[in-house]
Amino acid sequence: MDKLVIEGGRPLSGSIRIHGAKNAALPIMAASLLCEGKVQLQNVPRLLDIDVMLGILNRLGCSAIHKGDTVIVETSGANTCHVPEDLMKQMRSSIFLMGPLLARFGEVCIYQPGGCAIGERKIDLHLRGLSALGAKIEENDHQIWCRASKLKGNDIHLDFPSVGATENIMMAAALAEGTTIISNAAREPEIQDLQHFLNAMGARIMGAGTDTITIQGVSRLEPCDYEIIPDRIVAGTVLIAAAATRGTVTLTHTYPSHLTSLFHVLRRAGVQIGAYNDIITISSIGRPKAIERIVTSPYPSFPTDLQSQIMVLLSLADGLSLMKETVFEGRFKHVDELVRMGADITVDMNSAFIRGVPRLYGATVEATDLRAGAALVIAGLAAQGKTVVEQIHHIDRGYDRIELLFQRLGGVMHREAPILRQLDLA
Ligand code: EPZ
């Protein structure tokens, strides 16, 4: 398995272009199954999860390729509603195939999805939403069948504003008979991007970005070209890395309005942030201030996907901070690794008490999931000495060659592949 070797202690500086959003591209790639023809998606990053979704689409009979930052999916050849188990197990986003396949073929067979080990990650809200549209669900110990001769619009209330469930219901309802209203819907920017894409294909959806989304079903959708929004979590990760290394960095190709909650936290920590059009600038000179309390919750509140990263900054702050994680029950796996680098963090249930220390020290640490891995890279950049981050395939799921991203900002790090891979014998 590849690892990253980082020489820390240098402030980041320079300018970086932020790539397209993984969590927008994945559902939109799945949604391309709702039409027959060629869909072209621009600004799609090169990530392991994107590769897995391309693999699933090709196994379903589509022709899906990634050229530069453009994904081209020809969906006319789709000939099965059976999502391959081996690929389904590799990522949570394979669940997004349920809605489109059900709408297109009237049935879908999936397996419990894989993904980051950050909690139980049930799919009951997805299944309840699809059955509200008329799907009959059959589950056995590892397979889930969904069948619906005709999907019919309905009023659906989500017990929790689940991002994935909101997206699956939107995609299925787009071709249902009649109108669907989703209340307590997720409000993330990626939901809005999906609405814009579906409407570009001829769907009639409104309300994404609010807690109520209305979908008027149509009989057919047409292929289109579409550009994916920038990745707000990658942008947030870079901003936090700049603050943790007391650097001065400019980000381009961003949507600053997607990061308001992070800006608020960083300013409270004493960091200077500016935003103009698609550009964000950050400058951090002194030691960050502690933040009395940060609570993760659904958008537009502080995102759970930046929780592990901001904890690195708080580990270096002057004082005691409290982090409360309310979205996933198992998302503190990075804490033990940060403590091995000298952080002073105590966890109690879903709360972490972070007593800032003057510095972190390099160590050999292990990425346990995508964002925990990104946090360890930030810690390595800020720490004194050498850090080795292992199991970085987790990071490659959501960051396009993270070492190049930070090298461009003056970070000293390189990727080490196993010797057999280096000799191209693996
Ligand atoms: C999406 O996951 C993102 N993934 C996650 O990003 C992100 O952390 C999460 O939304 C929250 O913002 C993608 O978009 C591919 P949820 P998703 O359904 O859809 C519970 C990353 O790092 N729940 O909003 O799986 C669930 O257990 C990833 O890029 C149910 O109980 O998130 C969790 O506690 C990690 N039943 C909470 O809701 C369900 O049927 C939030 O889950 C569905 C979810």
Image (cartoon, helix red, strand yellow):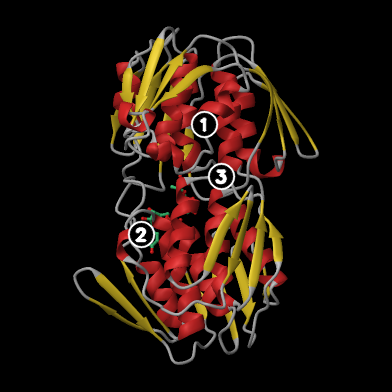
Residue 30: % across, % down: 52, 66
Q: Nearer the viewer, residue 52 or 143?
A: 52
Pair 3/1: label in front: 1
Query: Which quadrant of the figure contains the N terminus?
Result: top left
Q: Earlier in the sequence, mark 3 or mark 1?
A: 3
Vertical placement of 404 versus 120: above or below?
above
Determine contact: label 1, label 2, CB under 8 Å: no
Residue name at image x 61 percent, y 38 percent:
261
**Residue 402, numbered circle:** 1
Determine contact: label 2, label 3, CB under 8 Å: no
Residue with the mark numbered 3: 301
Label 1 neighbour load within 10 Å: few <14, some 14-19, many 20+ = some
Q: Earlier in the sequence, mark 1 or mark 2?
A: 2
Which residue extends farthest left? Answer: 141
Determine contact: label 3, label 1, CB under 8 Å: no
Label 3 neighbour load within 10 Å: few <14, some 14-19, many 20+ = some
Residue name at image x 48 percent, y 91 percent:
150
- The three-letter amino acid code for the residue at tag 2 is Leu
Residue name at image x 48 percent, y 66 percent:
57
Q: Secondary structure at mark 2?
A: helix
Residue 196: % across, % down: 69, 64
Q: CA distance from mark 2 to mark 3?
A: 32 Å
Vertical placement of 274 versus 197: above or below?
above
Q: Answer left or right for 263 relative to 233.
A: right
Residue with the mark numbered 2: 87
| Ligand 1 contact, mark 1 (Cβ < 8 Å) | no
Q: Earlier in the sequence, mark 2 or mark 3?
A: 2
Which quadrant of the structure image shows residue 12? top right
Residue 157: % across, % down: 48, 72
